[in-house]
Image (spheres, rainbow, N blue to C red):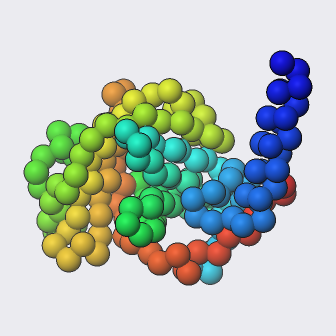
Amino acid sequence: MHHLGFLSRLFSKSNQTKEIKKRDVLSIQIGDILEYDLVDYEVVGKITYREGKYKWYSYQLLGENKSVWLSAEMDDELELGIYEKIQLPEASQIPPKLEYKQTAYFLEEQGQAQVTGEGRSSPLTGQQMRYAEYSNQGETSNISVEDWGSEVEVSIGYTIQPYEIKIIAGSL
């Protein structure tokens, strides 16, 4: 038995070194520094959402004067978004349509996910949350609603291209 434990430790170590070498938006770690739009952000939180076999990520990025969230999911292709928290109380009802700053957003999808958190998001581990995604007419802007039971968080964001983000791996 001890022998097996040693082997699995060996293998997990070699996997980790591979990950450090090729860091991408799906393997960002707490402590990494990301550069976006000429601003450096530190990754202070990471949330992994799982719905069935499907999973996606949200990273809390702390900049000099603001905090944003980077969402990353691999659908048919990589989808990235930058989000900021907003106040929109009516979103907690998950209506078919939301209005924000004179723009209409329409419900695209909703579901439930199991959550694992790291860094500042660690307390979320083990929770189940409900989510809803809204888009404006041209799908240039999105509103994300997360219902954690005790509170509902609403964010507004937009899609970005992978090349717009530069990852500077943390001190690993």
Judge left or right: residue 63 versus residue 171: left
Residue drawn where x is 23% and y is 40% of the image: 92
User: How many numbered marks, from 0 up?
Assistant: 0
Where does the image place residue 136, in percent across and percent down from the top left?
20, 69
Q: Residue at x 50, y 52 (%)?
A: 58
Say which of 42 and 109 sits in front: 109
Q: Residue at x 45, y 48 (%)?
A: 55
Q: Residue furthest top?
A: 1
Residue 32: give x, y in percent of width and height: 72, 59
- Return the residue nearer the eye: 7 or 30: 7
Image position of 155 (left or right of 27): left
- Residue 127 visible from this viewpoint: yes
Percent of width and height locating residue 19: 73, 58
- Residue extending farthest to the left is 96
**Relative to 74, is 167 above or below?**
below
Report the side of 133 relative to 6 (left or right). left
| Quadrant assignment for the N terminus | top right
Taking 84 as reference, is 152 left or right?
left
Quadrant of the snapshot with the C terminus: bottom right
Q: Quadrant of residue 125?
A: top right
- Quarter location, residue 152: top left
Is the residue 117 above or below the residue 107 in the image?
A: above
Asked whether 27 or 5 is in front, the reply is 5
Q: Is residue 133 above or below residue 13?
A: below
**Image point 47% across, 36% down: which residue?**
115
